[in-house]
Amino acid sequence: MTDLWRLSATDLAARIRRRDISAREAAAAALARLGAVNPRINAVIAHDPAEALAAADAVDAALGRGEDPGPLGGVPVTVKVNIDQAGWATTNGLRLQEKAIAGQDSPVVGNLRKAGAVIIGRTNTPAFSLRWFTRNSLHGATLNPRDPAITPGGSSGGAAAAVAAGIGALAHGTDIGGSIRYPAYACGIHGLRPTIGRVPAWNQTGPDRFIGAQLMAVSGPLARSIADLRLGLAAMSGADARDPWWTPAPLEGPAYPRRAAFCTAPEGMNTAPEVAAALRDSAARLEAAGWVVEEVAALPPLAESARLQALLWLAETRRGGGAAFAREGDPDALAVYGYMERLCPAPDLDAFQDALQRRVGLLREWLAFLERYPVAMMPVSGALPFRDHADVESFEGFQDILAAQLPQVGLPLLSLPGLAVSTGLVGTVPVGVQLVGGRYREDILLAAAEAIEAGGTPPSPVDPA
């Protein structure tokens, strides 16, 4: 019989519902895989097997009573250590928050539980969830299971590495500047950044976020199949009154033309030949599936959006003078925060308000473009996954990395959904593409991603290199 940890969330949920296997068997297999490979990659930094098995037993008991266990009934999942899970510390990779024990589940964790998911562990993130690399002074570094010389991505690097290595079929991640999309890209899996308000979020362990983060930060799923992303999104997006931004938008919108545009070099950015080839290959896969695909020389603005995103985020962080960074003393976080301060002058109140005003015009341009092309396809990054921790080696190196990440940083200010689709490998190094769509039209992105996925070989779990 196939190792249960290799199965997709969709397959596992169906088998458990049919009683072909038990939820306990699925959880035990996932925990055994965690024990076998996690010491080599440090993706999961905290877990309790007894708690996970008890949750699995509850699913089996519900099935025994003839009850619906939920769409994720018995599926092993992980959650990122920057969200509240009752009884666990929401460290966000910080020694400062080592004792920030959550008294209740965050909305996204609560929704996963309601859907029947079995939480098997909490995944690593860089300090403050700040980088596209994953290392902190509290939990250590996470390695990419495909190639330890390259970054697993960040900040949901632990989440992506876990899924890629078969530790859970589905992972929760967060994204304010690429933190779902880039780890998925770097680890050779798929990751969905939903529209703001699609997945409810709130942490009882911390204060409410400033307005910039409220407009830009989201939770979403990472998985090895697009079907699992669809299932994970449905489970995570249930209503929760604790998040005033939550929006009751349908998961399936009205009919749309199957038309896509792709651009290999948005804003004239430098794009590696392998990344451009992945975009053209994905365009061909879409065309073979009946989509009309057009290459365009330019997309609506990304660079201005990225600049304003950084302005808003840093303006809010600077209110405390970066005091938390100094108190934590994490060398990676201090380096990256210092580089960002050098690149983004401090705004006055007028500049802060001008940024929020300009956001509306930028979003209008994008929505007009997406009326004509319901899918915009572009690089996830202009470069193949970076050598691990290259961002903290020099200011010049950080600038180069930031330039390559334009397609990620340019999106969050607009509150639009983005989907990183793995398309294959260049040697041992993953490559893929990013799809962007209109507000609450994750369904269009998932449909296009399924066509791209069907034209290639879906990712399967790997043994850490």
Image (spheres, grey):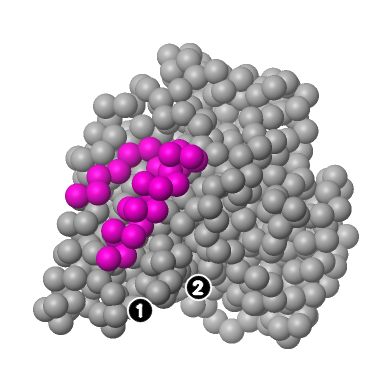
Mark 1 packing: few (<14 Cα in 10 Å), some, or many (20+)?
A: some
Q: Position of residue 286 (x, y in %)?
A: 73, 77
For numbered disc 2, what is the local secondary structure?
helix
Residue at image coords 25%, 80%:
19
- Range of residues picked out in magenta: 25-50
Instruction: Tell me where residue 58 sits by quadrant.
Output: bottom left
257 with respect to 80 (left or right): right
Q: Magenta includes 334? A: no
How far separated are the C-alphas under marks 2 and 1?
13 Å
- Residue where numbered disc 2 is placed: 227
Q: Main secondary structure of the magenta part?
A: helix
Provide residue 255's location: percent of width, then percent of height. Answer: 59, 84
Kind of residue indicated by mark 2: Ala
At horizontal 46% and vertical 57% (from top left) the residue drawn is: 166
Q: Is residue 7 visible in this depiction of the protein? A: yes
- Amino acid marked by disc 1: Ala
Q: At 37% across and 22% down in the image, what residue appears?
A: 95
Helix, strand or loop for disc 1? helix
In the rendered image, the vertical position of residue 372 relative to residue 100, given as above or below = below
The residue closer to the viewer here, 435 or 354, is 435
Residue 148 x, y percent position in the rendering: 61, 39
The residue that label 1 is drawn on is: 14
The image position of residue 368, as x and y in percent, is 71, 66
Q: Residues within 10 Å of mark 2 (few under 14, many from 20)?
A: some
46 magenta-colored: yes
